[in-house]
Image: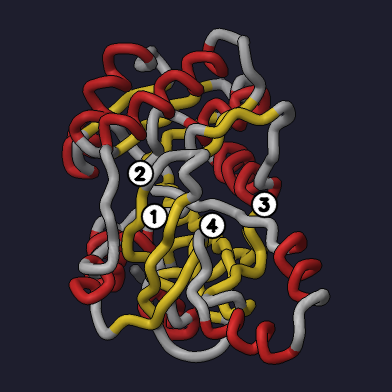
């Protein structure tokens, strides 16, 4: 599940040099890359998407993460390599906080965790724990590659939450840049609640700045790979109401992308939550 942060400063500099009527026209045009549209449903948005070649994406992620694993690169996110690690400090704090309550151990499901991006991002700190079990639930082709090239005593790959729970005792589930790419996000979230995890961590989850749920199309820059697909921006209150009877919010935080442009306007934002199961639940 992917998130791409685009820099619009150059576009705004160009706009400042244009006549007002041209600027007005510009505002009505969908952006070349990023997020656009307000669709009536998932299927309507899907018809506007080109799709993507999952094998190409998998290969790019595999190549990048192997370099990180082998010490040839520092950090990978969404197949892109970086010169320094861009930490989500609230996420890392939540992981270490949970481990502190579990006598220095951490067993987590990273749902949609690719080939281990978040694990490798944080392994400098995770390595100080007494015991770590990082379990990734992913699509079949990612699981096959993960088991072949990345799996070890700490990092495991599964096709489903149920398959993981059969083998592992789990403290928490992490959903980072996942929910907004589900066709039916609220049905999926109800499934997560029904699993009754003690802790649920959300990071890089997209919400509307104002207003109700919105379905957009996300177009990925071809410098990363050619793809476009539907993406939700959720109603934050509706999202929180779903969990209110079952979980307490320990903390909420602004995620890495912060404010997000939709149709050249700032209408969305990325956010994170740390939740703990209520005692009566």
Label 3 close to label 1 by CB (< 8 Å)? no
Q: Which mark is residue 204?
A: 4
- Give the structural element (helix, strand or loop) at label 4: strand
Looking at the image, is mark 3 or mark 1 nearer the viewer?
A: 1
Query: Which residue is found at the position 49% from the left and 33% from the top?
Result: 79
- Give the structural element (helix, strand or loop) at label 3: helix
- Which residue is the site of mark 1? 178
Query: Which residue is found at the position 54% from the left and 14% from the top?
Result: 67
Q: Which mark is residue 58?
A: none
Q: Which mark is residue 112?
A: 2
| Cα–Cα gap, marks 1 and 2 | 6 Å
- Give the structural element (helix, strand or loop) at label 2: loop
Label 3 Cα neighbours within 10 Å, binned few <14 / some 14-19 / many ≥20: some
Looking at the image, is mark 2 or mark 3 nearer the viewer?
A: 2
- Precedes in sequence: disc 4 or disc 2: 2
x then y, percent, for residue 235: 45, 82
- Precedes in sequence: disc 3 or disc 4: 3
User: Quick check: can you spot residue 28?
Assistant: yes
178 vs 98: above or below: below
x then y, percent, for residue 230: 32, 65
| Cα–Cα gap, marks 4 and 1 | 8 Å
From the viewer's side, name the closer residue of 246 and 228. Answer: 228
| Cα–Cα gap, marks 4 and 2 | 12 Å
- Precedes in sequence: disc 3 or disc 1: 3
- Which residue is the site of mark 3? 90
């Amino acid at each position: 599940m992917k998130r791409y942060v685009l820099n619009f400063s150059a576009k705004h500099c160009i706009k400042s040099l244009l006549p007002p009527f041209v600027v007005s026209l510009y505002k009505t045009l969908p952006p070349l890359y990023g997020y656009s549209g307000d669709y009536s449903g998932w299927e309507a948005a899907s018809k506007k998407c080109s799709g993507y070649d999952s094998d190409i994406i998998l290969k790019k992620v595999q190549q990048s993460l192997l370099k990180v694993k082998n010490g040839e690169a520092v950090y990978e996110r969404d197949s892109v390599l970086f010169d320094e690690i861009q930490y989500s400090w609230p996420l890392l704090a939540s992981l270490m906080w949970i481990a502190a309550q579990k006598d220095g151990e951490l067993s987590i499901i990273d749902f949609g965790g690719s080939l281990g991006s978040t694990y490798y991002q944080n392994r400098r700190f995770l390595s100080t724990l007494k015991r770590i079990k990082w379990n990734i639930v992913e699509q079949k082709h990612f699981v096959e590659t993960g088991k072949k090239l990345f799996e070890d005593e700490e990092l495991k790959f599964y096709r489903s939450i149920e398959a993981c729970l059969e083998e592992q005792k789990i403290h928490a589930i992490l959903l980072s840049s996942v929910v907004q790419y589900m066709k039916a996000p609220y049905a999926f979230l109800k499934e997560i609640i029904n699993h009754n995890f003690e802790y649920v961590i959300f990071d890089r989850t997209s919400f509307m700045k104002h207003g109700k749920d919105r379905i957009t199309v996300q177009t990925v820059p071809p410098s990363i790979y050619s793809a476009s697909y539907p993406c939700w921006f959720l109603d934050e209150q509706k999202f929180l109401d779903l969990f209110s009877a079952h979980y307490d919010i320990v903390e909420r935080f602004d995620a890495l992308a912060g404010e997000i442009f939709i149709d050249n306007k700032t209408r969305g934002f990325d956010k994170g939550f740390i939740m703990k199961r209520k005692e009566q639940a």
